[in-house]
Image: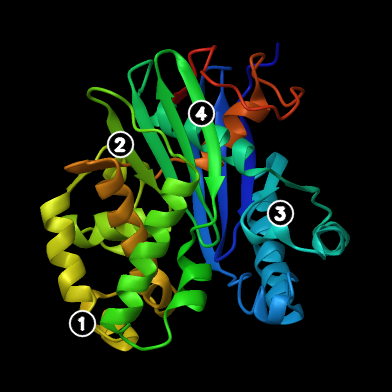
Amino acid sequence: MDFAPKNFASLDIGSHTARLLVSQWRGGVSLTPVLRRRAYIRLAEDFGVEGSQTIQPAAAERTLLVLDDFVSNARELGAVEIVAVATGVVRAASNQTAFLKAIRNRTGIEVRAISGEEEALLTGLGVRHALRIKREPSVIFDLGGGTTEFLIGAEGSDRAFSLPLGAAVCTQRFFRSDPPSAREAESFEREISKVLEAFHVPRPSGEYLLVGTGGTVTTLAGLIHKIGSGETSPERMNGLVLGITDLEDLLKRMTKMARQERVDLLGLDPDRGNVILAGFFIVMMIMRYFQASEMTVSLSDLLEGTLIDYLGEEGDSKSRMSPLPYLKNGLSLS
């Protein structure tokens, strides 16, 4: 077995953002982040308008430009493999095949559109390892631009699934005013509750750990714990706790702010400021649904889980990508 240090990269093409993680695999036992990047591609823009489930040309071109840059970064850092997955609106797009082919032709990278269940399992793999979660009951959710994935672990088994609740898609669908009117907010909350109930999302009995990940969650953690966007890292973010009282106070303030005020007063970048409120409503409704007084934050997520799974039990890139419910080989993320 070759234990020489090697760099590997993972890519996530989501509904609102594209993300890159380059990590060094050392000695077959540790994975150390080297570079982490995020760019707003707004792939969900005008997706589903007038019944069209297609990725629009402008959104596709934005994505290709970002991926060109990401792949160049990964190769400059000597990544021997780039493992890429697509989530959110990509898996629902009628032009998915053409879109993934365009990425392959432009960058040489094969992108796999993964199911919601696979996304939940891979995200859970990254979160569980980063937070050292073993077998205790837990609810892990990943709030993205187009969907929210859940991995619920209790009594020695897992349930993984995806719900049609995403910050970017829901902003486009439910909010017409800026800031949203009280009627729009109430209608959106009813829809979130309806979706959670319709999918019969199970609530663990007894005590459990609620963990949130995704851009909305980490942005809220940064606001409450006063961590600037340039200071975010797994070391700073993983394990932070957000109390529901602090979140409710922040939500009251934020619902009175127009988009530009969220950018100016809270220090958000424009693309995040545009969708943060819908994401915030989803987070709060999830916490209320699970009757949780607090939520633990994880910056580590699908990107780490994808690499852990890809490297596999032998510590090389020969394993197939099939989500592992639990880590078997003592891998550590430092």
The local secondary structure at tag 2 comes to strand
Local secondary structure at mark 3: helix
What's the CA distance linking mark 3 and mark 1? 35 Å
Residue ID for mark 4: 159
- The type of residue carrying mark 4 is Arg
Whether residue 279 sits left or right of residue 247 in the image: it is right
- Position of the C terminus by quadrant: top left
- The span from disc 1 to disc 2 (Cα, nearest Å) is 28 Å
Which residue: 57% across, 44% down?
22
**Number of marks:** 4
Assess disc 3: are there few (<14), some (14-19) or many (≥20) residues with their C-alpha within 10 Å of its C-alpha: some
Q: Residue 110, how many percent across, how many down? A: 81, 48
The span from disc 3 to disc 2 (Cα, nearest Å) is: 27 Å
Q: Mark 1 points at which residue?
A: 256
Of pointers 1 and 4, the one earlier in the residue sequence = 4
Q: Are marks 3 and 4 in contact (CB under 8 Å)?
A: no
Residue type marked 2: Leu
Disc 4 + disc 2, Cβ < 8 Å: no
Earlier-in-chain disc, 1 versus 2 = 2
Q: Residues within 10 Å of mark 2 (few under 14, many from 20)?
A: many
**Residue position marked by numbered label 3 in the rendering:** 91
Q: Between tags 3 and 4, which lies in front?
A: 4
Of marks 3 and 1, which one's residue comes earlier in the chain? 3
Amino acid residing under circle 3: Arg
